[in-house]
Image (tube, rainbow, N blue to C red):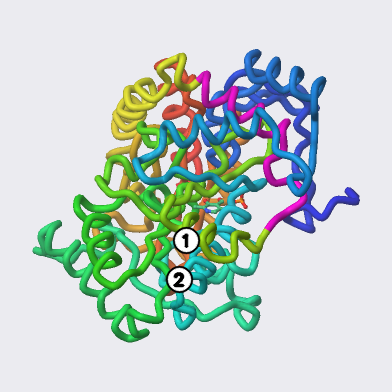
Amino acid sequence: MSRIIHRSLRSTPPVAASAEGIYITDQSGKRYLDACGGAAVSCLGHRHPDVIAAMHAQIDRLAYTHTSFFTSEVSEELADHLVAHAPAGLDQVYFVSGGSEAVEAALKLARQYFVEIGQPQRTRFVARRQSYHGNTLGALAVGGNEWRRQQFAPLLMDVGRVSPVYEYRDRREGESQDGYTARLIAELEAEFQRLGPQNVIAFVAETVVGATAGAVPPTPGYFRGVRELCDRHGILLIADEVMSGMGRTGTLHAVEQEGVVPDLMTIAKGLGGGYQPIGAVLASGRIVEAIRQGSGLFQHGHTYIGHPTAAAAALAVQKVIQRDGLLAQVRTRGEQLRGALLRRLGEHPCVGDIRGRGLFMGVELVKDRDSKAPFDAADKVNQKIKQQAMANGLLVYPMGGTIDGRRGDHVLLAPPFIVSEADIEDIADRLGSAIELCL
Ligand code: PLP
């Protein structure tokens, strides 16, 4: 029995022995096509020579230094690169080691901002039911995945809740898309009013929902409506792009497609592409300036923030994405993936919805296509698909919908940006046969 506390305490996963490009090989020699990049992480695939070279060079020079003593050239360069490619106004960067840390830092930056500008009564966050923002206590509190929250609920701060955007299940018969969007914005306004808008710090939302729903994009105009409402009440907008950001949807940041600029944006996963653990908060200069003019100190910090080796890996990943025109490739391959999934699975009686943006696609599995009835949790459909896909040499990210009761099983696909057209067909084919064997 392994000494590691694995995700399941009853089984030990296969041992990954090596990886190359979009494939991971286990100790037995079995090869898996990584169609989800782990958890939407490996955007360049494995063993990219430029990233490895940049990391080697950095380790050789300066592997680590603590930010209470020094900054480093490489972390400064990475911050400059991120700001140069961020939506206008997001011109400050706070580095962390991953997604949950990024969310924690964003929540605290937002709170401290209001304390420093003389609005300490703002203590409430509002977030959505169908959301995942991380597993640390602050991030878990804003997240809306009841299954993950349940046993820790007594430890979590009380967060205002509104509905997610989820057209497939929630847009009413005969309701227009604009009407549905307006209904969601009205619900958010009602929640702000219930809490007293002057008491709200921020609205937190994933731009494209990932781990709880399988790549559900917002409706057109949803984020513009959210932005207007937040501005009206002086409430900050925090976009969580830990999963959907850094090129995954075909633009570097998913919000670019929404025509809004959040006040704070969290990024991680694809930032370092899995070569090193790294995340960041991109912050509006206005927020940071207020703190600079006030106490002059963001009261937060971890041992590994601004880690030079992690920064070197992320900088190399981001430069490769830019040099090789990979955002355009994500858009092209994304449409090919959508087409391949529709051809292979579009008519399957248990496939309810195929959706997503760029190389971030979700397949929703249902017991009955017409009624959209979900499978029972006990059916463990998403786990069965995952296991069968692995048997077929394919890695996909499975999820069971767990908000307000059971709302379906999903499979998330987030392959590396370097996939070829043939790889896309291969992914659709292996997933199709896994679904056909299980359902
Ligand atoms: N936010 C979102 C949107 C995520 O999808 C995740 C992880 O899946 C996180 C935050 C937490 O990131 P991490 O697992 O790196 O702590």
| Three-letter amino acid code at the position of disc 2 | Ile
The residue where tag 2 is placed is: 117
Q: Residue at x 55, y 24 (%)?
A: 44
Nearest to the observer: residue 338 or residue 271: 271
Question: Reading the chain from its start, which is encountered first: label 2 or label 1?
Answer: 2
Residue 392 visible to the viewer: no
Q: How many marks?
A: 2
- Is 144 on the left-hand or right-hand side of 306? left
Mark 1 surroundings: few (<14), some (14-19) or many (≥20) residues within 10 A: some
Q: Residue at x 59, y 60 (%)?
A: 296
Mark 2 to mark 1 CA distance (whole Å):
7 Å
358 versus 316 height, above or below:
below
- Is 408 on the left-hand or right-hand side of 331? right
Figure quadrant of residue 213: bottom left
Residue 360 position in % (x across, y down): 41, 38
Instruction: Mark 2 and ligand 1: say if the CB distance to the nearest ligand atom is below 8 Å.
Output: no
Residue 79 position in % (x across, y down): 55, 36
Q: Which secondary structure dominates the residues rendered in magenta? A: helix
Asked if the stretch drawn in magenta spans residue 421, the answer is no
| Three-letter amino acid code at the position of disc 1 | Ala
Nearest to the observer: residue 198 or residue 19: 198
Range of residues picked out in magenta: 301-320
Q: Which mark is residue 290?
A: 1
Figure quadrant of residue 387: top right
